Amino acid sequence: MTSKVIWLILCVMLFAHIHCVYAQDDLFDLSLEDLANFQVNTASLRNQSRAQAPSKVTLITQDIIQKRNYRYLADLLKDLPGVRLSLYSSSVDSGSSQLIVRGITGNNKLVLMWNGQRLNHPDAQPLHITPYLYPLENIEKVEVVYGSTSAIYGSDTISMSINLISADTFEEHAFSTNIASGRYKEQRATVAYQGSYKGLTSEFIFDWFNTDGVDFSSFDEFYSQYPLASGVDAPLLDFPKQQRAPYYNPGEHAFTARARFAIDDWAFQTYYQSFKTQTQTGWSPIIYESNNSSGQYHFVQKGFYLTHKHTFSNDVTLESSLEHTRNKLNPDSHWNRPNAFPFLQYSAALEPRGVGTKTYKLNYGKRLKLEERLFFSAFDNQLHTVAGISYTHVDMLPKSGNLDFPGIYSQATSQVDPVNFHDLSEHNLGLFIQTQYDYSSAFSITAGGRFDDQSRYGNTFNPRFVINYENKPQKWFVKGIYSTSYLAPAAFFTFDTFIVPRTSQQVPNLNLKPEETTSYEINMGKTFKYFALEGSIYHTKVENLIRQRQVKSIQNLTDELGNYTFITTHTINAGNTEITGLTLEAKTVINNQIMPYISYTLVNGSTQDTGNAGQQYDLIHAPQHQIKLGFDSQWLDDKLTIYAQAHYFGKAPLHPDNYRRPAIDNNGQQFEMADYWLIELGARYKFNRHVSVYFDVSNTMDKHYEQPIVGQETSDWTRIAVTPGVPRQYFLGVEVHF
């Protein structure tokens, strides 16, 4: 750890002579109209204003990233309108967190890209979203596209698409370093470079993060008590804090390296990231202690992306790309049953397991993707089309029992050894097209679709249609958006297997279908001189919901020990969810010095599936009301930036079949998580063009609050009702540019 910090300091000294140029637009130097006309590209692969884009698009510029001290993707996500990000509410192999976007739940329902390169896992597993992954250094802007963009980016773009975009050109060499420290002995060091030499533009970033981990041990209900049956009156097994202490080591570590090079029509980028965390945080923290030592999850992801553009004419361009992504769980990772008092009370019937895993959902994944995109325009530049073909091949090893002895999927149906490695390969052939026709300077129509032939679950087709109208003289716009998408069932769901002798088993379901999502949205906005408004009304329906642990058969059997009942379960498609909501946003500028903003989101929805005895129940986990407000401000000749914000999350229903609580209370209502406010504040001071200091305090009042737990949306069974919210966090740092 010390050697890495020393290395970073030496890098700063080595490059201290390099001159830094940061040419960027300052928010307070631009009118609200200028901000509304910022160019975006992700929604259509065509540079245009947000009003002209065929989606609801939110733009976060480099200036906002710096002024609000955004360090990682999670910092940005939590501030987005209509988004609820619950950190540490999931087991690490389920994404470490839960993201809800306008009522749609799941880290596997968004697509994250870096300059168009997918950073999602190959197997449709949830994207890891932690407080320390995906650093934002060297990112010129972040484009967030709400809703599906399946015609361009794949059938699984459901809740949103996020593109981290680097700068295209650099006037001179720019070098920066960033060092910060925070609560729980948090340490962060970053080195970044951007530059151009004889037509070759290049950039790199090295980001190192280490912390002793967020201390949740004071939440006794979550970490000390474990229900032995369902219902509020169920007896609890107690795990006193002093007996848990030897196993509680929530330290976390992450390292990210990114590099990008571009010359003429070629671009190449590559990345490497790894993180380590304790397996105790998340879904079932008490039972998943390891054998006389704390658990560990060590995940590595790396990849590269090569693109080439060939221009045939001013109207026709061909873009070719090769993308490769590889994920791997380190063999030292372990998530074992406890094997020491008092945990032995629960695990006496289970053999202790050493190196290797029992329940990690994805241990290895490799994706290779080839894609050709043809861009052409016609009719005096009124018609803009992108059409293409893609081929994706994926190899994966999900759901392993021991990393040292790989097996094949045919063993998955055997009761002899159902937790061995399961090797799987699959491929997807995609054809897509999206056309935007500018009928006039005010009116445009976008239409497109995507056809996919997937080797595991068959064919899907996703149409998309958008109407845009923009009145530029009066500065308002309106869009009507129709889109569809399919979420492939993760291989873990399809091939999930386990066996508990004389009790139960889970068997694969090779006929599992994708979840199908259909969305309708009206997005509108108007800009005044010192005031801007935007709103969206949306309706989403999700069909073929995937449900785990559903009963397939019940058998009364007899062996040498006597009679017993044996239950076989599997994962099935069951039911649907419907969501209706609206989001309103407003911002203004006061004296070119203070920029207040506010957003309000209202979400209503319901689900009907095999849970809750087949009865319809309210949409779980998504708060009906959500408010996010705050301000950015500049002082002392723009050297000092101060920001503050407050987030309100209303009550949110729990799943009615939660193991810890009964389906409904005595009045026939679902139990709910309480509402709460969170306050954050921070500042940045620029001593000169080279040196800045900054700080941030989140959950300033150290509010204790409940977060939804991942798993209830796909399974009827979970022993933990909620997870604790993240306590007060703070960090202080210095940033140096040369």
Image (spheres, rainbow, N blue to C red):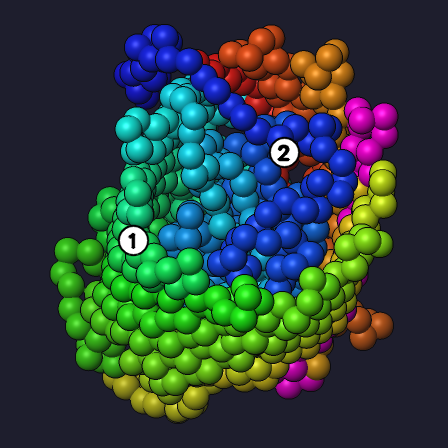
Note whether 446 is above or below 679 in the view shown. below
Mark 1, Cα crowd under 10 Å, few <14 / some 14-19 / many 20+, is: some
Q: Find numbered disc 2 in the image and state the secondary structure of the residue it sits on.
A: helix
Residue 2 figure quarter = top left
Give the percent coordinates (x, y) of residue 28.
73, 28
Q: Find numbered disc 1 in the image and state the secondary structure of the residue it sits on.
A: strand
Q: For the residue marked with disc 2, what is the amino acid? A: Ile
Q: For the residue marked with disc 1, what is the amino acid? A: His
Q: In the shown orientation, is residue 434 left or right of residue 293?
A: right
Mark 2, Cα crowd under 10 Å, few <14 / some 14-19 / many 20+, is: some
Give the percent coordinates (x, y) of residue 162.
52, 52
Residue highlighted by disc 1: 308
Q: Examine the structure image and report whether residue 712 is included in the region drawn in magenta.
A: no
Give the percent coordinates (x, y) of residue 322.
27, 57
Residue bounds of the magenta highlight: 588-615
Q: What residue is shown at x 36% (from left), y 75% (from top)?
A: 430
Give the numbered dot on residue 64: 2
Observer able to see residue 59 = yes
Observer able to see residue 657 = no
